[in-house]
Each structure stands twice: as structure tokens, then as C-alpha cells.
């Protein structure tokens, strides 16, 4: 009789574990499906950033390199001349080009600084929205008894009640620690 009871308990547990395995496999497959979409989004973002970098280099870096090469050429041309003094008109043209490049560089740096500041503010706002959402979700389901404990089969009802009471006790202690950590985090954010 005891052997039959053990077989029955093991068979029920085997069925429960089989169902759990099937749901877990479905969740893993869903995760991978979403992960592939996320990976493709990241790849697309990387491609866009690469294109933006190419445009940036074409608009800012290449003119500076061109100016540098032009200056080297003029200097080498001047050094090969028998006259050791460069032409004043060439020097004025070079100085004008250098001033123009410096102005362009300053304008670009200011624009980049403004963009960075705007992005940092946007990221800060998103960060607070995400943290608030996580805290609200955590707060809503924190004291709920996990479904694994609810479907737990136990021959002793007192033992099951004791497990539920221990869970609530641990959850309350953990909840108080989380509240302290949240308060510390809020103080450090100010």
C-alpha cells in the first residue's frame, strides 16, 4: 500500500514537472524570438550609427585633414624655394582658412554639447520612468504568494500553513530592507 502511495505521489509530481518543463520551454522560445528582434534592432542601430559617423567624418574631419595636407604642401613648396620668406598673400589665405576651420569646429562642438545635454536629460527622464515602473510592479506583487507554493502538495496542512507564514515573514523582512534601500537611493539622487 505504501509503495502504491509513493508511485501515485511520484506520478503526480512527474506530471507537474512535465507541465512545468513544457511551459518553461515555451517561455524560453518566446524569449529567444524576442531576443532575435532585439538583436536585429541593435544591428540596425549599429548600422545607422556607422552611417552617421561616416557623415560626421566627411563633414568635419576630412576638411581638417585636407587643410593640413594643403598646409604641408605649401610649406614644402616654400622650403624648396630659394627665397626663405613665404608670400604674404599665401600666408593670409592660410590664416583665413585656419580661422574658418576654428569657427566651424567651435560651432560643431557647441551643437554636439547641446545634443549631449538634451540626450542626458532624456535618458535621466527615461531612467526615472523605468525605475518608477519597476518599483510599482514590485510593490504590486511583492506580498503575493508564488504559484509554486500554492500548488504545493503537502500531506500535512499544518506544514503548508507554516511554509506560508514563513514566506510572509521573510517577505516582510525583505520588504523593510527594500524600503530602506529605496530611501537611501532617493537621498543619493538628490
Image (tube, grey):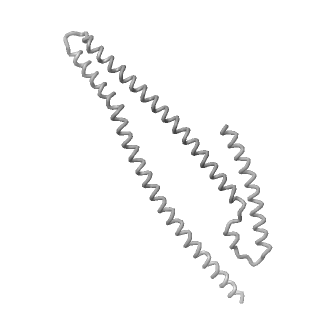
Residue 180 percent across, percent down from the top left: 73, 47
Locate the N terminus by quadrant: bottom right
- Write down the quadrant of residue 37 in the picture: bottom left
Q: What number of labels is visible?
A: 0
Q: Residue at x 76, y 67 (%)?
A: 164
In the picture provided, is 108 more to the left or to the right than 132?
Answer: left
Q: Residue at x 78, y 72 (%)?
A: 159
Q: Residue at x 38, y 41 (%)?
A: 52
Residue reaching furthest to the bottom: 1
In the picture provided, is 55 more to the left or to the right than 131?
Answer: left
Locate the C terminus by quadrant: top right
Q: Residue at x 40, y 43 (%)?
A: 49
Residue 95 percent across, percent down from the top left: 33, 17
Residue 76 percent across, percent down from the top left: 24, 19
Give whichever of 3, 170 is nearer the camera. 170
Residue reaching furthest to the left: 82
Give whichever of 186, 65 is nearer the camera. 186
Give whichever of 77, 136 is nearer the camera. 136
- Write down the quadrant of residue 93 in the picture: top left
Residue 174 higher or lower than 16, as above or below = above
Residue reaching furthest to the right: 158
Residue 154 higher or lower than 112, as above or below = below
Residue 69 higher or lower than 18, as above or below = above
Residue 173 higher or lower than 79, as above or below = below
Give whichever of 116, 75 is nearer the camera. 116
Residue 111 percent across, percent down from the top left: 45, 31
- Write down the quadrant of residue 96 in the picture: top left
Amino acid at each position: 500500500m505504501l509503495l502504491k502511495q509513493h508511485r501515485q505521489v511520484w506520478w503526480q509530481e512527474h506530471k507537474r514537472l512535465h507541465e512545468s518543463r513544457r511551459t518553461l520551454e515555451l517561455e524560453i522560445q518566446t524569449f529567444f524570438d524576442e531576443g532575435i528582434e532585439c538583436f536585429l534592432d541593435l544591428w540596425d542601430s549599429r548600422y545607422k550609427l556607422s552611417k552617421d559617423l561616416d557623415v560626421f567624418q566627411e563633414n568635419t574631419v576630412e576638411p581638417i585633414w585636407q587643410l593640413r595636407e594643403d598646409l604641408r604642401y605649401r610649406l614644402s613648396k616654400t622650403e624648396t624655394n630659394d627665397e626663405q620668406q613665404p608670400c604674404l598673400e599665401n600666408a593670409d589665405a592660410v590664416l583665413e582658412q585656419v580661422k574658418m576651420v576654428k569657427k566651424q569646429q567651435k560651432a560643431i562642438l557647441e551643437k554636439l554639447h547641446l545634443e549631449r545635454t538634451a540626450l542626458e536629460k532624456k535618458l535621466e527622464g527615461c531612467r526615472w520612468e523605468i525605475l518608477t515602473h519597476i518599483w510599482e510592479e514590485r510593490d504590486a506583487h511583492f506580498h503575493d504568494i508564488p504559484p509554486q507554493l500554492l500548488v504545493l502538495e503537502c500531506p500535512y496542512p499544518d506544514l503548508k500553513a507554516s511554509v506560508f507564514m514563513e514566506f510572509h515573514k521573510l517577505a516582510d523582512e525583505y520588504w523593510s530592507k527594500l524600503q530602506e534601500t529605496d530611501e537611501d537611493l532617493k537621498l543619493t539622487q538628490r
